[in-house]
Amino acid sequence: MTERHQHEQGVPHRHPLRPDQDDTLTYWRAMEIALRELLIEKRLTSADEVRREVEAMDNRSPVDGARVVARAWTDPQYQQLLLMDANAACEALGLERGLYKLIVVENTDQVHNVVVCTLCSCYPRFLLGLPPDWYKSRNYRSRMVNSPREVLREFGTVVPDDVVVRVHDSNADMRYLVLPRRPAGTDDWSEEQLAELVTRDAMIGVTFAAEP
């Protein structure tokens, strides 16, 4: 049966893996395949809808997160909303609210925040795109909790001894985003210019925002 005929008949089939994908059939991958193919067989979704959603997820980037941070840096009222109700703040910019509670934590002169998921890789993908490999690694997940300053130094981030480091553990229902400190010398910068200084790693908290 050809692939075209399979689509026409509604018969589920597996799309070929990308060259960079690991084809090891783990328990969770087998469960995902079984559920996906059952949903397609029951006509609750289609292989094309699944493909479009996966492509949309793969194409997300930290750009939207950077927009949120840049607006907070330039608009005190928006920053207050972001810290009180981050989901509503995202919606106010025309962005997706996310399916979970988003909490934004602000870096200050006294506190530096950093995010981890100790169980797996929970992460605000709708604002930051796919999580980096190091964020998902057991090394990062365990050591960031026990030795945060040491791990931060490995990223080139030295937090002064008089600044408290707070580690926030994301989970399936709640995700964190760090609002980094605004770099000095950017008082007259536009939101678009400021957004270019906001990196994914700064919004996770393992680095500072880029210097102008």
Image (cartoon, grey):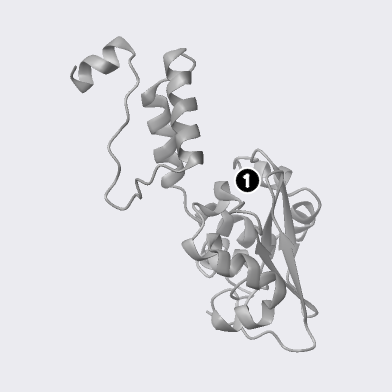
Residue 140 figure quarter: bottom right
Above or below, 172 relative to 151:
above
In the structure shown, which secondary structural element does the residue marked by tag 1 occupy?
A: loop
Return the residue nearer the eye: 67 or 134: 134
Residue 201 figure quarter: bottom right
Return the residue nearer the eye: 117 or 80: 117
- Image location (x, y in percent) of residue 63: 50, 55
Query: Residue at left 69%, top 50%?
Result: 171
Query: Residue at left 46%, top 19%?
Result: 38
- Image location (x, y in percent) of residue 43: 45, 13
Q: Which residue is mark 1?
A: 93
- Image location (x, y in percent) of residue 165: 75, 76
Query: Residue at left 48%, top 19%?
Result: 39
Query: Residue at left 30%, top 42%?
Result: 17
Q: Residue furthest top?
A: 9
Quadrant housing the N terminus = top left
Above or below, 13 relative to 15:
above
Above or below, 212 relative to 100:
below
**How many neighbours does mark 1 have within 10 angstroms: few (below 14), some (14-19), or many (20 or more)?**
some
| Residue kind at label 1, given as amino acid type | Leu
- Image location (x, y in percent) of residue 155: 54, 79
Please indicate whether residue 91 sits to the left or right of residue 137 in the image.
right
Answer whether residue 185 is visible to the viewer in this image: no
Please indicate whether residue 140 sits to the left or right of residue 56 in the image.
right
Please indicate whether residue 98 sits to the left or right of residue 31 in the image.
right
